[in-house]
Amino acid sequence: MAKELVARWWNGTWGRLTRRDVWLAREVRWQVVARAGDSEMGKVLRWEFDTEGEARQMVRRLVQADGGQWREQSGDAATQPPR
């Protein structure tokens, strides 16, 4: 089964140190991937969940903990999470 990108969020900040991204994806299990920083130097964290509800709860925690002007990305803006 190929990985399916379900949703993506971005905190709206371009700065290398302040940018935050969160992806919600599903392969066999639900995955949440969060990156702090840019694509070159950012720190990537990953979690796996059995249900979509558990995964979305983690996404909410990540977005609310950082504050800012988070926006859900869709279409071409919804890039795949880092590997």
Image (cartoon, helix red, strand yellow):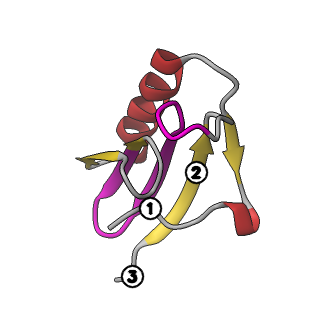
Q: Does the magenta stretch include residue 17?
A: yes
Q: Name the residue under label 2.
A: 8
Q: Quadrant of the C terminus?
A: bottom left
Residue 79 vertical position relative to residue 46 in the rendered view, above or below: below
Q: Tell whether 11 sits left or right of 50.
A: right
Which numbered disc flags the more N-terminal residue, 2 or 1? Answer: 2
Image depth: mark 3 or mark 1 in front: 1
Callout 3: SS? loop
In front here: 70 or 1? 70
* Label placed on residue 81: 1
Query: Mark 2 touching mark 1, by CB under 8 A?
Result: yes
Q: Which of marks 3 and 1 is nearer the N terminus?
A: 3
Image quarter of residue 15: top right
Which numbered circle lies on residue 2? Answer: 3
- Whole-angstrom CA distance, mark 2 to mark 1, is 9 Å
- Along the viewing direction, whichever of 83 and 58 lies nearer the viewer: 83
**Mark 3–mark 2 distance (CA, rounded to whole Å):** 17 Å
Instruction: In the rendered structure, find residue 42 and report the number of the disc placed on it.
Output: none
Among the two numbered marks 3 and 2 on one chain, the one whose residue lies closer to the N terminus = 3
Closer to the camera in the image, 25 or 82: 82
What is the C-alpha distance between the residues marked 3 and 1? 13 Å
Q: Give the range drawn in magenta.
A: 15-34
Horizontal relation, residue 1 to residue 13: left or right: left
Q: At 57% from the left edge and 16% from the top edge, which residue is drawn?
A: 67
Determine the secondary structure under disc 2.
Answer: strand
Name the amino acid, label 2: Arg
**Cβ–Cβ under 8 Å for marks 3 and 2:** no
Q: Quadrant of the N terminus?
A: bottom left
Q: Residue at x 38, y 41 (%)?
A: 55
Q: Where is residue 29 in the image (x, y as percent from the top left)?
A: 28, 60
Amino acid residing under circle 3: Ala
